[in-house]
Amino acid sequence: MLLSIGMIVKNEEKYLERCLTALKPILENVDSELIIADTGSTDRTVEIAKQFTDNVFYFEWIKDFSAARNSTLEKAKGEWYMFLDADEIFESCDELIEFFNSGEYKKYNSASYIVRSIHTDMKSYSDFDAPRLTKILPETKFVLPVHESLNTYNNPLKNLGDVAIHYGYAVTAREDVLKKFKRNSELLLKRFEEEKGKTPLIYMQLFDCFIVNDVERAFEYLDMGIEYCLEHNDRVAIALYAEKASYYLSKNYFDRVIDICNKYFELPSAIRPFVLSSDAEITGLKATALYKKGEKAASVNEYIKFINLYREVKRGTLRTSDTLMYSFTLATESNYPDIIYDFTEACISTGKYNTAVQYLKSVPISKYADDHNYIVNRLEQEFEIMRHVGYKNIADIYRQLDEFGKERFTSLIRREIAVSDNKKAMFKALMSMKNVSGAFAELIKIYNGHYCADGIDIKNAEGFLKENPVNKYPDMLYLLAAENKDISVFLNAEGCDIGGCLKFCFDCFDDAEIVFSAYNAENISDCAFSGALKFGRSVLDELLQRKKDISAAIDLYGAIGLRYAEAMLNADAVENIRLLPSDIASALIIGNIVRFREERNYKACIAQLSMLIRVDLDAAQLAGAVKDIIRAEQEKMSANAARSEMDMLAMTIKENIRNYIKSGNINAAVNTLAEYEKINPLDMEIDELKKQLANM
C-alpha cells in the first residue's frame, strides 16, 4: 500500500463529513487507507467517520497529541504516512494524487501541502506549507505533546500546491477560545519547563497560544525566543521576526513593523545565509507598513521587491524550508490582489503610472472575476492610469471581463468620456476594438458621433433607447440635450426615472447645469408634455439641491408650462389654475412669473408665488429661490435708478463749478468742488477741475 492517512478526532461533527468527503478522491485514486482514532466524542463524530472507513477505533486521551497520532501511525500499512485535522477541507488534491500515481514520490522523503487558515473574520487567511507527509521509516513517530510533528520529516521534500482550508482558527466563541487556550498553554508550559526553553520553536508556539488571552506574556516569550535564537544562530528567528511584524501591522504600529523588518534583513548569515521565501513575506510587511503610514514613494520600491520575490515563491524557484515554520499572512495568493491594489494606489499617488501598468499585467483581471468588489476597484484604477498613459490597453482590459465586469466597464467608460482630456484618443481605441457588439458597441458609436464626428444620429439614438432601458443609459439624456435634440424618447419611456437620470448627468458632466438649464423646450415633441413637465421640475430640483443658480432653469420650466397650457388647456382651465393638477399648475404659474419678470411686473410675480405655494405643497423651496431672484432684480433696478439720479446730480454740480470758473467766481468754485469731492472722491474729473482752478 502506498499511503496511510491518519486522523485523531473528538466532537468534530461540524466539519468532519466535509473533510472526509474531500479526501475521497485520494482514497479512490491512490492505493491508500484511512485510519481514525477517536479520543472520546459525545456527538455524531464516530458515526460519520464509520461512513468513510472501517478503521475507526477508540484511543483514551492522555493529554498528549503525539501519543494519539502515534496510535494511528502504529496501524499504518502504507509506505507513506499523511495526517490532517478534521477541520481541514481540501479544495483540491490533484497534485497529491499525481505525486503518488506518477511515481514522483520515489524521489522524496517528505512532502507538504498548503494549509490555509481562515481567520475569525472568515475572509482573510494565512498560508502555511504544512509538513504532513513522510516516508515511513522504522523510527518514524510523532513527537511533542502539543503542536506535534513527525521526527522523520527529512529532505528531499516536495512542496505540493494543493490547498486544505483550515477552520480551526476561525473560532469566535470566547468560551471555545479560552478552552483551547487552557488546554494548549498547560501542555506547552509543561514542555517549556522540561526542556528549559532550549527548543526554539516552543517560543513561537507559546506566543501563538498566549496572544489570544495575554498579549504582554505572549511578547515576553517571543522576545525571549528572539534573544535565544540570536545567541545560538537558530533559524527559528526568521519565524519569530515575521510573527512579530505581522502582529504589529494588524495593530497599525507601522514604525515598529518597519524597524522589525529592517532588523530581519540585518540577521547574520548563520541565520539567513541567502535569499529565503520569508524575504517575500517580510518585504510585503514592510511595504504595507510604509504605504499605510503614508510614505507612498518608499512603499513603491518595497512593493516592487515584494512582487519579484513573490513571483519566485509562486513559481517554486524560491522555496526554502523556513516556510515550514510559520504561516505567511501577506505572501499568499488571496492577499496578492490586495497588495497589488495598494501598490497601484501608491504608484498613482506618486505619478508612477507606467510602473503600475507593468505590474498590473501580472494580475489578470479574469482570474478574479468572481470578486465583484475587486473588479470594481481594479477598473477604477485602470481608468485612472489610462487617463495619464493613454488608452492602448483598453481592449485587453475589456476582453478579460465577464458580464458583470463589462457592465461596470461600460459605466466607467461613460464617466471617463465626461472627464477625459483626450477623448479622440480614447474613441480611436474604442472604435478599433474587435468582437464588440450589442448595446456597448452602439453606445460607443453614438458617443463618437457626439464628440468626434458631426453629431448624434437622432434615429440611431432613439432606436438604441427604445431597445435598451433608458434608466440604464442616463448619459444619453445629456448627449441629446447637449445637441438640443428631442428628448421625448426619455420622457415617454415607461418607468423612466427622470430625476435619477439627471442626477447621474449632473454627477458626471461638468457642464450639465448649463446644458439642461439652456435646453430649448420647443424641441420636445407634443406627445411628451407629461414627461416634459417632470423634466423641467426635476432640473430645478437638482439645481436647488446642489445650490446652483436656477435663473435659466426657471425660464425652461416656465416655457414648458406655457407651451403645455397653449396646446392642452382651454381658457377656462388657464383662468382657474387652482383647479389644475399640481404639476401642471406649478409649471403654468412659473410660466406666468417668467412673463411678468420680462415686464418687470414684480408685484404680479409675488402674487403668483403665493399661489404656487397654495397649489403645490412641495414648492416651498422653489418659491423661496424664485423670490430671492425677484428681490435681487428689484434691488438691482433700484440701485440702477439711484445711480442714474446720482450721476445727473454730479453732472449738474460739475457744470456749476465750470460756470463759476468761467465767471471768475473762484471762491464759489473752490467751495463747491471741496464739498463735491467729499461725496464723490473717486470722480476722475476732480483733478482736471483742480488744475483749472490752479491756473486762474
Image (cartoon, helix red, strand yellow):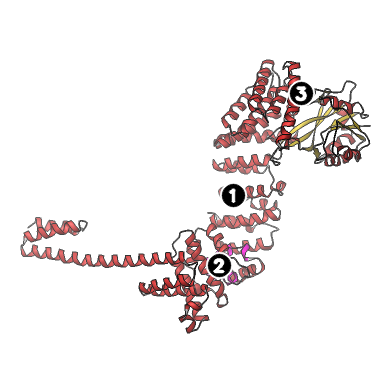
- SS of the residue at dot 2? helix
Q: Amino acid at mark 3?
A: Leu
Confirm whether the magenta stretch covers residue 490. Answer: yes
How busy is the neighbourhood of tag 3: few (under 14 within 10 Å), some, or many (20 plus)?
Answer: some
Q: Which residue is mark 2?
A: 480
- SS of the residue at dot 1? helix
Of 348 and 549, which appears nearest the observer? 549
Check the image and name the residue furthest to the left. 664
Magenta region? 470-491
Q: Which residue is mark 1?
A: 386
Residue 677: x and y in percent read 17, 57
Which label is found at residue 187? Answer: 3
Main secondary structure along the magenta-highlighted residues = helix
Confirm whether the magenta stretch covers residue 247. Answer: no
Identify whether 433 is placed above or below 466.
above
Nearer the viewer's eye, disc 3 or disc 1?
3
Of 337 and 638, which appears nearest the observer? 638
Count of labels shown? 3
In the visual, does 643 lie left or right of 106? left
Q: Amino acid at mark 2?
A: Leu
Nearer the viewer's eye, disc 2 or disc 1?
2
Quarter the C terminus occupies: bottom left
Of 483 and 504, which appears nearest the observer? 504
**Residue at x 54%, y 70% (from the top left corner):** 534
Of 398 and 577, which appears nearest the observer? 577
**Residue at x 75%, y 31% (from the top left corner):** 180
- Name which quarter of the figure residue 362 lies in: top right
